[in-house]
Amino acid sequence: DGGITQSPKYLFRKEGQNVTLSCEQNLNHDAMYWYRQDPGQGLRLIYYSQIVNDFQKGDIAEGYSVSREKKESFPLTVTSAQKNPTAFYLCASSLSSGRAPDTQYFGPGTRLTVL
Amino acid sequence: QKEVEQDPGPLSVPEGAIVSLNCTYSNSAFQYFMWYRQYSRKGPELLMYTYSSGNKEDGRFTAQVDKSSKYISLFIRDSQPSDSATYLCAILTGGGNKLTFGTGTQLKVEL
């Protein structure tokens, strides 16, 4: 059963704490992405990775960090430097075969709330 | 000005109505136009995508692109309560993998 899984579904964090959101895919996709979704703002790209051990900042990378040690995994850490971390976080992946369009498929999301 | 503009709604229609959802964009380099459906508290799922100007049909859904006006539309025929969701347009430059999203339009189909 192929797909993208994200855990946990809901996450609560105290101010000043770092938290890590998990994203795993078994689609054999090369590229993975992290987005943040806020009401009225659509999806905004945080980080993306096109290959293992390499990643690039998106539009709103400040206060976040990622790693890509395995093809199937792309965890996102929300650090205490992120000023307004409460949001719905979405992970996506794509084949990145070089053949356009490189369609992205999304996981179910993690809702992070800062208390 | 945002690169992709989309009316957030909410849009409420009776069951069986034809729904028109629209986006405008500003970047002429955009080449692939996608529509995602997102149910409440779920991840977006890809409905369909188009490349050139014109229409593309998939069941009750029709995607339309007018590159000269930089205007894209999604039509839903015979709308059902199960179509109630947020619809996101997303646009991709040719050869790239960075999607630019609209804010999404919230649709409610009522019995």
Image (tube, coloured by chain):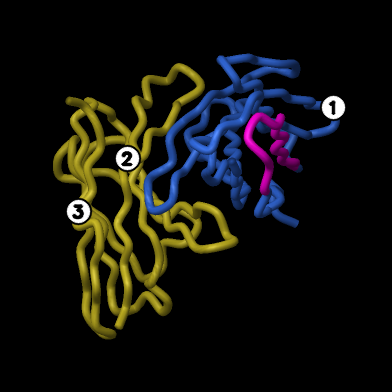
Q: Which residues are magenta?
A: B12-25
Estimate the x, y position of residue B30 in percent, counting from the top left: 66, 32
| Residue under the point 19% across and 53% down | A7
The mark found on residue B2 in the picture is none
Chain ID of residue with mark 1: B
| Residue under the point 63% across and 14% down | B57
Estimate the x, y position of residue B38 in percent, counting from the top left: 47, 43
Element at label 1:
loop
Q: Nearer the viewer, residue B73 or B2?
A: B73
Instruction: Give the chain coloured blue.
Output: B
Residue that numbered label 3 is attached to: A7
* Real-space Cα separation, disc 3 to disc 1, in angstroms: 43 Å
Estimate the x, y position of residue B46 in percent, counting from the top left: 46, 30
Marks 3 and 2 share the same chain: yes
Instruction: Give the chain coloured yellow.
Output: A
Element at label 3:
strand
| Residue under the point 59% across and 46% down | B108
Residue that numbered label 2 is attached to: A32
